[in-house]
Image (spheres, rainbow, N blue to C red):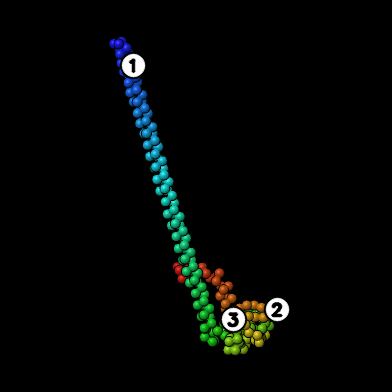
Amino acid sequence: MNGIEKITGRIASDAAQEIESIQAEARRQAEEITARYAEQAKRESQELLERGRRSAEERVERLASVAQLEARKLELAAKQEMLSKAYDKALEQLLNLPDQEYTALLADLAVKASSTGQEAVILSQKDRTRFGKQVVTLANEKRKDGRLTLSGETRSIQGGLVLSDGDVEVNCTFETLVRLQRGELDREISKLLFGE
């Protein structure tokens, strides 16, 4: 029995060593796998954090850009409103000129817009009653060869006049003249109003 016990003892001892060696190798491999996955998890975590940070920065930039665009839109709308008010004020000042200046202005418009000197001058009802004959007389004097006439027709205009020669009309109403000047004068008026 002694021999069998020695052999079984040796087999048991060899088996225990081999088990211990296998367990040590399994522990080493498990630690290596754990370390590898821990490193991979750390890398992926850092990548996710970096992507999140970049995404947040991009969102902040987009929101800032949108806010700046909205601010520019509001500023532009305010400037457009101020320009419109300036033109409205100019129209109001034209309409409220002293009678003598107003008459002279209408006569000058008629002279400059007249091509044949034989057009009919159409005014608003109010202007026709107050200034009609004076405007035509003054315009004819300035034109020298003029035979402008005061039309019996009136138009619903704020101020200014319309010259009519048959089917051809020349619109010299203040509303139209101010509107036509808008495109040409916007830059200069913006400089005056806003220092641009």
Q: Is residue 52 visible?
A: yes
Disc 2 residue type (three-letter)? Asp
Q: Residues within 10 Å of mark 1 (few under 14, many from 20)?
A: few
Front residue of 29/160: it is 29
* Side (left or right) of 193 relative to 143: left
Q: Residue furthest right?
A: 166
Residue type at the position of mark 1: Ile
Q: Position of residue 68 (x, y in %)?
A: 45, 60
Q: Look at the picture and state if 125 lies above or below 49.
A: below
Could you tell me residue 55's position as x and y percent?
43, 49
Query: Which residue occupies the extreme front position in the image?
Result: 1
Circle 3 is placed at which residue position? 157
Comes first in the chain, label 2 or label 1: 1
Residue at 63% x, 80% y is 162
User: What residue did someone put label 1 on?
Assistant: 11
Identify the residue at image location x=65%, y=80%: 163
* Mark 1: secondary structure: helix
First reached walking from the N terminus: tag 3 or tag 1: 1
Query: Which numbered mark, 3 or 2, is in the foreground of this view?
Result: 3
Please name whichever residue, 61 or 24, is drawn nearer the observer in this view of the structure. Answer: 24
Q: Is residue 160 above or below residue 57?
A: below
The image position of residue 135, as x and y in percent, is: 60, 86
What residue sits right under mark 2 in the picture? 167
Q: Label 3, label 2: how many angstroms apart (C-alpha)?
A: 19 Å
Q: Residue at x 49, y 67 (%)?
A: 77
> 187 or 25: nearer the eye?
25
